[in-house]
Image (cartoon, helix red, strand yellow):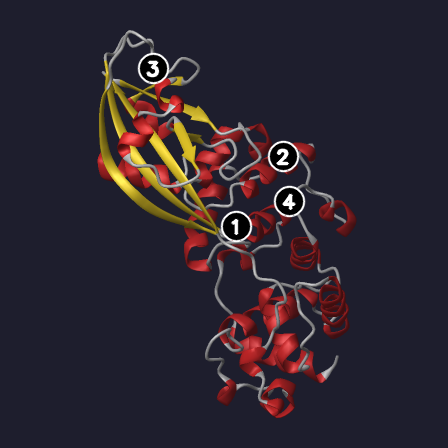
Amino acid sequence: MNMFSKTLLNWYSSHKRDLPWRDTRDPYRIWISEIILQQTRVVQGYAYFQRFIQHFPDVKSLASASQDEVLKLWQGLGYYSRARNLHAAACSMKGKFPTTYEEVRALKGVGDYTAAAICSFAYHLPYAVVDGNVYRVLSRYFDIDTPIDTAAGKKLFAALAQEMLCVESPANYNQAIMDFGALQCTPQQPQCGSCPLVDSCGALASGRVQQLPVKQHKAQTVNRYFNYIYVRAGAYTYLHQRRADDIWKNLYEFPLIETDTDYSEARLLASPQFQALFASDETPVVRLVQQSVKHVLSHRIIYANFYEVSLPECTHSFSGYLRVSQDDLEKYAVSRLIHQFLEKYT
């Protein structure tokens, strides 16, 4: 065992986080936890993990559920492709979780990191994880400025992580380096003064701790403008399911008009897209109830207007949309943006 690994394992023995998915070697539970934590903080992910396992305790129960059920349970976590991929992968397993790295890596939605985590935690196979914490710890300790978001950087750090791995205890080592990055070698204000690697840290010696790791590309943010039509037709409203390969795929939402800029109320109501929603013999009562609601996603900012449209219960408008009882709205998986509107307004 190299000194780097030994030091991390010693640190981990007294600093490891108490997380519910660490008390099991069940690959299914480990898989669920890792997918949840891909884009979610541990504090938020804990409740979702518990609820998910309660509803779907094993591969068979997840595979037998509908995708709508899975998306509804996932509601609020974001990055909904994770839920769709979980369901698709469970359906492909035929009731039994795979046991080799190659089989696990082939599951839909599972990349190198997740496959290494599952195989090392569940089966104690010697595969090193490489996530944001690992990139940070290794780049700082070895003072490496190769950008981590390039092919060369990914290859370099994957090889280095595997070289540093303690093959006698891959599960503990992988947990140790990730916890070390999360608690000790943090992105901002790392605890260098109490770091057990302080005497051999390359970035500390070169004065580059805050500059590492390096990223070459920065994704540009795109603004999008959504105009939602919340229909009140007696006891009913209207929804549709997003089918395009876009954000919130397969989630439900109110009838939507997306525009290239932030339309005024008068401009939207005069638009052909708005007029096409209504039967020719009906005159809706329209009211702007929420304006320019800002909703931030990764690389996207959505500005949403919500219009309430009142129509008779027997309306012929909104043909092609799903007619839903107001009381049944909670049964449908919706985005956080829609959910927050419903919580505030209904």
Q: Quadrant of the N terminus?
A: bottom right
Q: Are marks 1 and 2 in contact (CB under 8 Å)?
A: no
Mark toward the start of the polypeptide (1 vs 2) = 1
Residue tagged by mark 2? 88
The 10 Å Cα crowd at callout 3, few under 14, some 14 to 19, many 20 or more, is: some
258, above or below 2, in the image: above
Please name the amino acid that badge 1 sits on: Ile
Residue tagged by mark 4? 109
The mark closer to the camera, 1 or 3, is 3
Q: Are marks 1 and 4 in contact (CB under 8 Å)?
A: no
* Residue 317 placement (x, y as % from top left): 34, 13
Q: CA distance from mark 4 to mark 3?
A: 41 Å
Q: CA distance from mark 1 to mark 4?
A: 12 Å
Q: CA distance from mark 2 to mark 4?
A: 9 Å
* Residue 145 placement (x, y as % from top left): 67, 77
Can residue 346 be seen here? no
The 10 Å Cα crowd at callout 2, few under 14, some 14 to 19, many 20 or more, is: some
Please name the amino acid that badge 3 sits on: Phe
Mark toward the start of the polypeptide (3 vs 2) = 2
Badge 3 marks a residue whose secondary structure is loop
Badge 2 marks a residue whose secondary structure is helix
The label shown at residue 36 is 1
* Residue 322 placement (x, y as % from top left): 41, 18
Residue tagged by mark 3? 278
Can residue 239 be seen here? yes
Residue at 61 percent of width and 50 percent of height? 26
Q: Are marks 1 and 3 in contact (CB under 8 Å)?
A: no
Q: Quadrant of the C terminus?
A: top left
Mark toward the start of the polypeptide (1 vs 3) = 1
